[in-house]
Image (cartoon, rainbow, N blue to C red):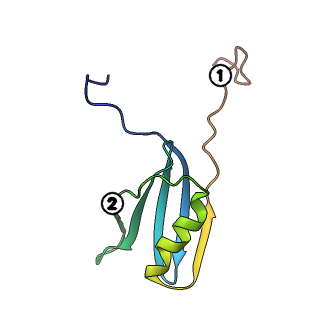
Amino acid sequence: MPQPGNPLPPAVVNTWRLSVGTSLFVIDILADGSWRPAYIAPKRLGGWTMDVLPNMPPTLVDIAPSVRTWARQYGANVTNRRTPARRFPAQTASSNRTPE
């Protein structure tokens, strides 16, 4: 429950996977138009780690060009793949399962 004077952060409305050369990023697009980049890096002994970078300010125009411009600091070959929105199964009164 939010506390007075402490509003909830904006919700994530979309997530993009971005590759720049051999670097991988996850970009969360927030409801207020800002976006939160995170760098994905391999760990030395296997697995992956995620380093969240500073939030970027809201963009009043299309976010994609802003993300591409930001990503070019890491290399010229920028590939952006938007991940589909998560869909949760609808709750229905009837079920295909039979009782055991």
Judge the density around disc 1: few (<14), some (14-19), many (≥20) Cα neighbours within 10 Å: few
Q: Is 52 placed left or right of 35 in the picture?
A: left
53 over 11 or under it: above or below: below
Q: Is 79 placed left or right of 11 in the picture?
A: right
Q: Secondary structure at mark 1?
A: loop
- Locate residue 4: give its quadrant: top left
Q: Compare residues 35 and 62 and report the one nearer the observer.
A: 62
Q: Is 72 placed left or right of 86 in the picture?
A: left
Q: The C terminus appears in which quarter of the rendering? A: top right
83 over 23 or under it: above or below: above
68 over 35 or under it: above or below: below
* Residue type of the residue flagged with mark 2: Pro
Q: Secondary structure at mark 2?
A: loop
- Locate residue 43: give its quadrant: bottom left
* Residue type of the residue flagged with mark 1: Gln
**Residue at 59% across / 55% down in the picture?**
61
Tag shown at residue 91: 1
Q: Identify the mark nearer the N-term, 1 or 2.
A: 2
**Residue at 29% across / 78% down in the picture?**
44
Residue bearing the label numbered 2: 54
